[in-house]
Image (cartoon, coloured by chain):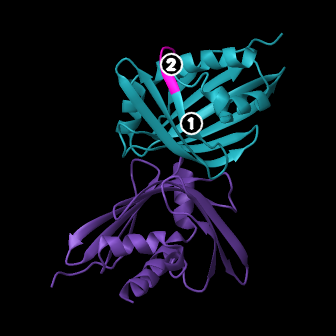
Chain colours: A purple, B cyan
Amino acid sequence: MTTTTHETQIVADPDVPLVRITREFDAPPSKVFRAHTDPELVVQWLGPRGLEMRIDHYDCRTGGSYRYVHSDANGEYGFRGTFHEVRPDELIVQTFTFEGMPDGVALEKLVLEDVGDGRTRLTVTSLVDSFADRDAMIASGMEVGIVQGYERLDEVLAR
Amino acid sequence: MTTTTHETQIVADPDVPLVRITREFDAPPSKVFRAHTDPELVVQWLGPRGLEMRIDHYDCRTGGSYRYVHSDANGEYGFRGTFHEVRPDELIVQTFTFEGMPDGVALEKLVLEDVGDGRTRLTVTSLVDSFADRDAMIASGMEVGIVQGYERLDEVLAR
């Protein structure tokens, strides 16, 4: 059996203000895609453990938009954006803003690749317009949320 | 009377893959904003002279989307994207794709500043994820379309 890489790689690009996240999943692209686009599945895994997630709207189609709220004992954290392009089982291009920093916006691309044996490699890039903002995004603890979120996604995909 | 700068400045950022366009207009922010958001006005100025413009849809509000087609004797050129945020008289954040290069996407911010005397300074930044794509965008002749488009916008604003 081929070794599966469940490690989440998070790399700060040296040339442009972009973060690149790579992760493999034991499920085919169609299933990983659906877990990113069906709000009833998204709400089960997006974000770190220990937060409640409430979806305001999640209209994941080309030209659609989304908003969701994470909450814990300290308060609520809203996130929103638009879906620039949604190409089934292959690609999602979306914008992303944390409402606590309303002037910050990232352009995100999620690329799904079939790597055989019913597995998928997901590559997510998040582009902002300055290295300072990119480095602040990494320093803010995004890694914990991403790693834990993908562990929860593994569990959703295994059901 | 203060001197008005109608020159269009187009600058390639040295640090990030971004183009910054700066232009002043002899109209207040509310009027320049409306000329960017009302499709009946947009169709009168967006793009170079000598092209026909047809708007497929132009739903310029936070979470909306747009598509338009330029055409000339050589064919049709489609453009589309989403409006991540629309803040009246101040800010438009949108995505932009030329359908002839469907995998290319830019994140654009349009900032309107009141510079007094009924004038507005417009700053547009266009961010992509590689310097090669940014430089290709500049080399493609974007300057002609932008300079001529803003001359046409001057005419719309003067009516």
Task: Nearest to the eye among marks 1 and 2: give it.
Answer: 2
Badge 2 density bin: few <14, some 14–19, many ≥20, Cα 10 Å? many
Q: Chain of mark 1?
A: B
Residue B138 percent across, percent down from the top left: 42, 27
Q: Find disc 2 in the rendering and name its residue.
A: B48
Badge 1 density bin: few <14, some 14–19, many ≥20, Cα 10 Å? many
The mark that comes first in sequence, 1 or 2, is: 2
- Residue shown at 71% from the left, 74% from the top: A76
Residue A60 lies in magenta, yes or no? Answer: no
* Residue type for callout 2: Pro
- Residue shown at 42% from the left, 87% from the top: A155
Mark number displayed over residue B147: none
Residue A84 percent across, percent down from the top left: 49, 51
Q: Is residue B54 left or right of residue A90?
A: right
Q: Find disc 1 in the rendering and name its residue.
A: B125
- Residue shown at 47% from the left, 50% from the top: A17
| Majority secondary structure of magenta residues | loop
- Residue shown at 35% from the left, 39% from the top: B101
Q: Is residue A1 above or below residue A31?
A: below
Label 2 secondary element: loop
Q: Is residue B116 left or right of residue B107?
A: right
Q: CA distance from mark 1 to mark 2?
A: 19 Å
Q: Is residue B123 above or below residue B52?
A: below
Can residue A96 be seen in the rendering of this structure? Answer: no
**Range of magenta residues:** B48-53
Can residue A125 be seen in the rendering of this structure? Answer: yes
Residue B44 percent across, percent down from the top left: 61, 22
* Residue type for callout 1: Thr
Q: Is residue B57 left or right of residue B98?
A: right
Residue B10 percent across, percent down from the top left: 53, 24
Q: Is residue A63 above or below residue B106?
A: below
Q: Is residue B21 left or right of residue B133?
A: right
